[in-house]
């Protein structure tokens, strides 16, 4: 399919594992930048940098202050920040995104994608979700949204001109035309969309026209990418963005999931960011094989900045990987109260509540372990694996007792408990593939327990991971593993996260 020189070896896909859906990418010189949706989590819109499209380093979160991002407690989980588009134009970075439930579509700019980003320019005239930005040769800015509709936009004021014009509704008979991206490539304007819905029927389609407003002719080979009805290990493939590398080659970032277990298959890491090669044939993109082992691209690789397995909370500011539910006020979450510790102060809300005091990081490996040293002091708190308020497992320390809880839908239960000496205690979770029990095996098991000073791990309870999967819980996010305070003040000395073989 290509005369591209092919070095040997492969790189793993997803290139950004864990809950990193709806990727949008742009390039400035040799530097790539990518953003993802983030829903009810604060800070929102993680920003990544890469020099090779394969290795990505999180350099910040675009929406990191309440004046940019309000996620009120009455907003349901998986609402909030939906799909963003990131573009570079006129010497600035432009981020357009939807806050579903507070403000709708809005536009942010930055000179440095690591931040700070501006306060929002609100876009009352831009309806729906999945907004895209594209500029034509005379500087007119075109905003295209799910549906697929389009309007002209002044991106500095947010003013729109005229009513949204319907452009295309995707492949006839296919639902949910969304995630539009508009590109000027060669003699054509190309309109790339997702269709089929972000579940197993997801796919990518494209059309082209002579002007940014069309009319557009669909690609005869649509969908140009889908894994629907295939046994492939990557499913739900869609929501793509095209990017050209400095060597002229073309690539696509997109979302996909990795279901495991028996039927129907459960994915627990949310929708992850994958990379696929693209070739152009007769003026249409042809997407190469999307696999979990991607052939090494024909340029030098630049390893991402490693995120240490252990966070000692020695820094004044938390690493950008750490996210909280809807907000993270300083008075409830600080590393300044006890040096070298993260202090969480409960707001009277448990993990069952939308304003739980929780600080977590995305689970990024199908098998992994996490540990944290907790001093419950006068309160209750511990280590949790969260999908949403109604789907989470946790191990909690309080006054000489450690208890494992499970919340599945409307059922909350105490699973196991054990006495421990007063004072700090190391809590942990080991996440491993479930034993095969076809056709009813789950995706994995989660063993919660106590790590002794000599390194032995005593599991108090082992729980079925299917109940912390999207197929059970629904929604658009993936597991987040972290620390929480359910009452009083709880201190955390360190947090370890590492993949297991
Ligand atoms: C997003 C839409 C979608 O706005 O799911 O993957 C929505 N497709 O394009 C939330 O991620």
Image (spheres, rainbow, N blue to C red):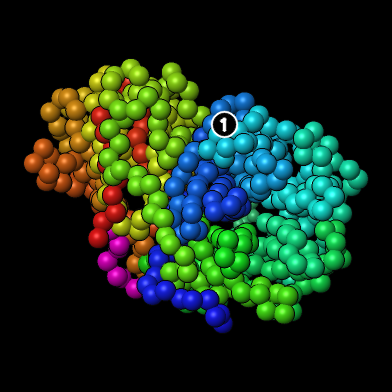
Which residue corresponds to mark 1? 116
Compared with 466, 351 (above or below) is above
> Which residues are the magenta region?
432-438
**Seen in the image, is 315 located left or right of residue 167?**
left
Across and down, in percent, residue 310 comes to: 27, 40
Say which residue appears at 44% left-offset and 37% top-offset. 320
Residue farthest to the right?
A: 162
Q: Does any portion of residue 408 appear in the rendered image?
A: no
Q: Does any portion of residue 437 appear in the rendered image?
A: yes
**Seen in the image, is 67 located left or right of residue 326?**
right
Answer few, some or many: residues within 10 Å of disc 1's Cα (few below 14, many 20 plus, some between 14 and 19).
some
Say which residue appears at 25% left-offset and 60% top-offset. 501
Across and down, in percent, residue 421 comes to: 12, 28
Across and down, in percent, residue 261 comes to: 37, 67
Q: Quadrant of residue 483?
A: top left
Across and down, in percent, residue 385 comes to: 36, 44
């Amino acid at each position: 399919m290509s005369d591209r020189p092919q070095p040997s070896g492969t790189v793993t896909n997803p290139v950004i594992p864990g809950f990193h859906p709806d990727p949008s990418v742009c390039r400035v010189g040799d530097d790539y930048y990518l953003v993802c949706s983030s829903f009810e989590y604060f800070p929102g819109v993680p920003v990544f940098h890469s020099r090779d499209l394969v290795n990505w380093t999180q350099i910040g979160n675009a929406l990191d202050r309440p004046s940019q991002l309000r996620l009120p407690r009455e907003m349901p989980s998986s609402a909030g920040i939906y799909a963003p588009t990131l573009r570079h134009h006129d010497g600035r970075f432009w981020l357009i995104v939807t806050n579903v439930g507070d403000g709708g579509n809005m536009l942010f700019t930055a000179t440095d994608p690591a931040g700070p980003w501006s306060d929002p320019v609100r876009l009352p005239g831009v309806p729906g979700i999945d907004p895209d930005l594209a500029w034509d040769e005379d500087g007119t800015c075109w905003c295209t949204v799910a549906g697929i509709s389009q309007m002209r936009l002044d991106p500095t004021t947010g003013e729109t001109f005229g009513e949204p014009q319907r452009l295309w509704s995707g492949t006839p008979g296919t639902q949910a035309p969304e995630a539009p991206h508009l590109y000027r490539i060669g003699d054509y304007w190309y309109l790339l969309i997702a269709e089929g819905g972000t579940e197993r029927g997801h796919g990518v389609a494209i059309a082209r026209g002579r002007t940014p407003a069309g009319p557009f002719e669909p690609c005869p080979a649509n969908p140009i990418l889908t894994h629907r009805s295939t046994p492939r290990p990557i499913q739900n493939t869609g929501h793509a963005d095209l990017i050209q590398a400095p060597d002229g080659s073309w690539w696509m970032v997109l979302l996909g999931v990795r279901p495991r277990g028996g039927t129907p298959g459960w994915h627990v890491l949310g929708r992850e960011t994958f990379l696929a090669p693209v070739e152009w044939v007769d003026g249409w993109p042809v997407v190469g094989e999307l696999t979990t082992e991607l052939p090494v691209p024909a340029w030098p690789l630049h390893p991402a900045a490693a995120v240490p397995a252990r966070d000692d909370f020695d820094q004044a500011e938390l690493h950008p990987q750490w996210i909280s539910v809807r907000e993270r006020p300083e008075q409830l979450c600080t590393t300044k109260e006890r040096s070298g510790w993260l202090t969480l102060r409960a707001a009277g809300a448990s993990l069952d509540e939308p304003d739980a005091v929780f600080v977590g990081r995305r689970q990024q490996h199908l098998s992994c372990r996490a540990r944290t040293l907790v001093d419950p002091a006068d309160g209750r708190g511990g280590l949790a694996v969260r999908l949403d308020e109604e789907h989470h497992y946790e191990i909690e320390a309080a006054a000489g007792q450690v208890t494992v809880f499970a919340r599945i839908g409307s059922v909350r239960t105490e699973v196991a408990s054990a006495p421990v000496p007063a004072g700090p205690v190391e809590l942990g979770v080991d996440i491993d593939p479930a034993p095969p029990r076809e056709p009813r095996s789950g995706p994995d098991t989660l063993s919660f327990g106590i790590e002794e000073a000599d390194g032995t791990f005593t599991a108090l309870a082992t729980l079925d991971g299917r109940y912390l999967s999207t197929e059970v819980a629904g929604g658009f996010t993936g597991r987040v593993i972290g620390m929480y305070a359910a009452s009083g003040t709880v201190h955390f000395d360190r947090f370890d996260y590492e993949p297991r073989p």
